[in-house]
């Protein structure tokens, strides 16, 4: 039986926009198992990113609970939650969010440096990861010198830096053209086949096609769950 | 046998402007006396005195007896300086002159300097006020730069928080960057100060033919500037660092 990586129960998240409460997540239950490839589809503003933030311990639920690798995120201090994200969760963002002053390798090294890995080991691992995502020839290039697809590959390599149990990707192909998006999709598929647990929030149905679990969201609730 | 001519010294600028060389004979008269010949035995630079540096008059230095004769005003002296031998008691000399020369007022060099430099003290206070305004302006400028940088960095900071970078690391990142900016700004300011003072001195020394220093960046001043620059960097860096890490990451991303 596969182990549970993340689990949400009766999850609610309400924001205040001025004096108006906005119920972004309304009573979601979801389980992410090891080696799953989970795709969450839905229109803009339906709460997909909020759900991802809650699952990754970036945000804390208003009600209900998220257990991330056995830890209830509400019970962890900010410091421990940050450390848990650093060591066990990888994030991939729509706009890459690489540090422009650092090279590709240095961006990948950043989470490893924070985790305390010695410089020679983290450099070697960064080079291995960049090789894995097909960027061995762009190790010392800065983000400004890379294409959108290459930047997203660097971001994926960074997400893999500390050998995470779970990778959360928020619209990872949203800034890319169709061909480049398809290449990133293949990379995610390869990651999953190599044993990485993936949760991808996307509009892009081609990214959802190879998923082992597909969720559709509308108005803060999961409407369907299907295993193709 | 002919009497040797009386000697005089000419101020350098006087000699250059009148095209007179050492060894030349010059004829000089007083207002009511006849012309008399003097031989130029040397030239000298005018003392570096800010109260006289802008004066364009011609100057010569005579032996006291020759000067009295030239002016036809024997036994009449407005001022004279006394150079003491090493070890001589200045106070004793002042007291002796006051005793011997009725009506004379002997003053120590510092008193004369203080009496003639009051204007420059006022100017110096103005300079300090200007320096204070400049430093305040520079600190505000640094703060504005950092605030702009902070706005740029909010998203980066939020993303770093998301991927697990600690608040401490983010704080140190922003703090050290600000401190480096302040350090570089201070260093550039000091270099500009040194270069600027060298250029100002070169220009005015040439203009007034003096060895006077018109602008100086002393070691003490440089240390003060470095201290103020780095202290400003520490304060602004701390504020910027706290600004970046204060909020939760997801909150930061919404800003």
Image (spheres, helix red, strand yellow):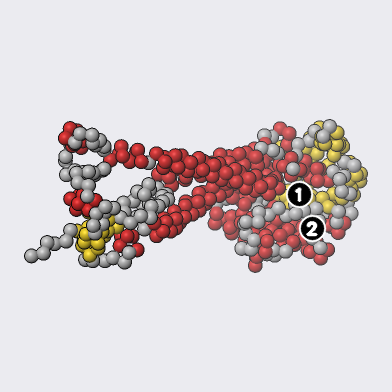
- The mark lying in front, picked from 1 and 2, is 2
Are circles 1 and 2 on residues that touch, CB within 8 Å? Answer: no
Residue bearing mark 2:
A175
The residue shown at (75%, 54%) is A95
Q: Quadrant of residue B43?
A: bottom left
Q: Nearer the viewer, residue A68 or B45?
A: B45
| Left/right of residue B204 with respect to residue B108 in the rendered view | right
Q: Subunit of mark 1?
A: A
Q: Subunit of mark 2?
A: A
Residue bearing mark 1:
A168
Residue A24: % across, % down: 85, 39
Q: Secondary structure at mark 2?
A: loop
Q: What is the distance, in whole Å, between disc 1 and disc 2 at their CAs?
A: 17 Å
Q: Nearer the viewer, residue B98 or B219?
A: B98
Q: Secondary structure at mark 1?
A: strand
**Where is B238 relative to B68, above or below?**
above
Q: Is residue B160 visible?
A: no
């Amino acid at each position: 039986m596969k182990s549970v990586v993340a689990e949400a129960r009766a999850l609610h998240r309400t924001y205040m926009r001025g004096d108006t409460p906005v119920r972004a997540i309304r009573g979601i239950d979801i389980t992410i198992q090891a080696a799953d490839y989970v795709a969450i589809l839905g229109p803009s503003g339906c709460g997909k990113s909020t759900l991802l933030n809650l699952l990754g311990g970036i945000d804390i639920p208003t009600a209900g609970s998220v257990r991330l690798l056995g830890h209830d995120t509400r019970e962890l201090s900010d410091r421990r939650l940050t450390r848990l994200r650093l060591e066990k969760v990888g994030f991939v963002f729509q706009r890459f969010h690489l540090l422009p002053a650092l090279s590709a390798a240095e961006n990948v090294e950043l989470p490893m440096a924070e985790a305390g890995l010695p410089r020679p080991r983290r450099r070697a691992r960064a080079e291995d990861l960049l090789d894995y995502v097909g960027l061995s020839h762009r190790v010392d290039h800065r983000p400004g010198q890379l294409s959108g697809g290459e930047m997203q590959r660097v971001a994926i390599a960074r997400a893999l830096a500390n050998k995470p149990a779970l990778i959360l990707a928020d619209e990872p192909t949203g800034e890319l053209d169709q061909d480049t998006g398809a290449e990133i999709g293949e990379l995610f598929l390869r990651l999953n086949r190599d044993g990485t647990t993936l949760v991808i929030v996307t509009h892009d149905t081609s990214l959802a096609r190879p998923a082992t679990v597909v969720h559709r969201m509308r108005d803060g609730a999961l409407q369907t769950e299907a295993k193709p | 046998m002919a009497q040797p001519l009386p000697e005089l010294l000419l101020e350098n600028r006087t000699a250059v402007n009148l095209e007179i060389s050492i060894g030349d004979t010059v004829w000089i008269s007083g207002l009511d006396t006849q012309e008399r010949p003097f031989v130029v035995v040397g030239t000298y630079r005018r003392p570096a005195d800010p109260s006289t540096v802008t004066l364009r008059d011609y100057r010569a230095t005579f032996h006291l007896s020759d000067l009295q004769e030239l002016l036809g005003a024997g036994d009449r002296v407005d001022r004279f300086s006394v150079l003491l031998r090493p070890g001589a008691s200045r106070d004793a000399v002042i007291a002796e002159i006051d005793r011997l020369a009725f009506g004379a007022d002997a003053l120590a060099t510092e008193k004369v300097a203080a009496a003639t430099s009051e204007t420059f003290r006022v100017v110096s206070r103005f300079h300090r006020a200007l320096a204070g305004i400049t430093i305040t302006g520079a600190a505000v400028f640094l703060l504005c730069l950092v605030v702009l940088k902070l706005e740029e960095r909010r998203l980066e900071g939020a993303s770093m928080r998301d991927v697990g970078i600690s608040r401490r690391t983010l704080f140190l990142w922003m703090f050290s960057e600000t401190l480096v900016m302040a350090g570089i700004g201070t260093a550039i300011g000091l270099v500009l100060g040194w270069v600027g003072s060298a250029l100002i001195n070169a220009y005015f020394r040439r203009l007034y033919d003096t060895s006077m220093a018109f602008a100086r960046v002393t070691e003490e001043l440089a240390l003060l500037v470095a201290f103020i620059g780095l202290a400003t960097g520490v304060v602004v860096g701390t504020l910027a660092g706290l600004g970046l890490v204060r909020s939760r990451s997801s909150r930061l991303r919404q800003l």
